Image (tube, rainbow, N blue to C red):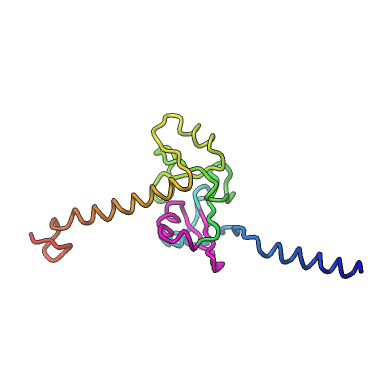
Amino acid sequence: MNYKLFTLSIISIIIFNSCSVEPREIKYGEEACNFCSMTVEDTKHASQVISKKGKIFTYGSIECMMRDNLNSYNDLILASVNDFESEKALINAEDSYYLIHEGFKSPMGANLSAFKDRKIAEKLNGDHKGQVLNWEQLKIHFEIEKKNSKEQMKCEAGKCAPGKCGGSN
């Protein structure tokens, strides 16, 4: 009887452990960003996504992850971001807080950093010239950015060379 119980316990542990989804270690300096194709080097701003199909996507910055996955959040099983305070430490993106602040440069220019602790993000935003956002607010921020960039493209129509963007001059 003890042998059967032991075997059943081992099988249960294997099944339970195989169901947990965790980010894999990013190979800094070797992997390319899934969005912009630049080499992932920044250990404070990188991010990673795991799809429902188990595919892993690595990004050189949080903004690249956000722009790449803007309309596909339902296809993600896990999104992870580097904690700015702990180099190379990937934390759950949905439980993180984000600081957009000119004093904290990120690889693709959005000045976006992630923090495990909201109080740290607020403290670093001491001058209140930046924004501290949660995951849902960050998604809205990037949806607005996408909408504004499309509107800018429309606004420039007619100002281009003949045959370009509808320009007639």
Q: Nearer the viewer, residue 102 or 120?
A: 120
Q: Which residues are magenta?
A: 47-75
Residue at 43% x, 45% y: name it: 137
Q: Is residue 151 left or right of residue 140?
A: left
Residue 50's quadrant in the figure? bottom right
Q: Residue at x 46, y 30 (%)?
A: 126
* Total numbered labels placed on residues in the image: 0
Relative to 114, does residue 166 appear above or below in the rendering?
Answer: below
Rendering coords of residue 53 (x, y %): 54, 69
Which residue is situated farthest in the left direction here?
Answer: 169
Position of residue 157 in the picture relative to residue 59 (left or right): left
**Quarter of the image where the N terminus is located:** bottom right
State the quadrant of the C terminus: bottom left
Farthest residue to the right: give it: 1
| Location of residue 33 in the rendering, given as x and y in whole percent from the top left corner | 46, 60
Q: Nearer the viewer, residue 42 or 169?
A: 169
The relative height of residue 104 versus residue 15 in the rendered view (above or below) is above
Percent coordinates x, y for residue 101 in the rendering: 41, 39
User: Is residue 98 located in the magenta-colored stretch of the structure?
Assistant: no
Q: Is residue 90 left or right of residue 15?
A: left
Image coordinates for residue 14, horizontal then vertical, percent: 74, 66
Q: Residue most toward the front?
A: 1
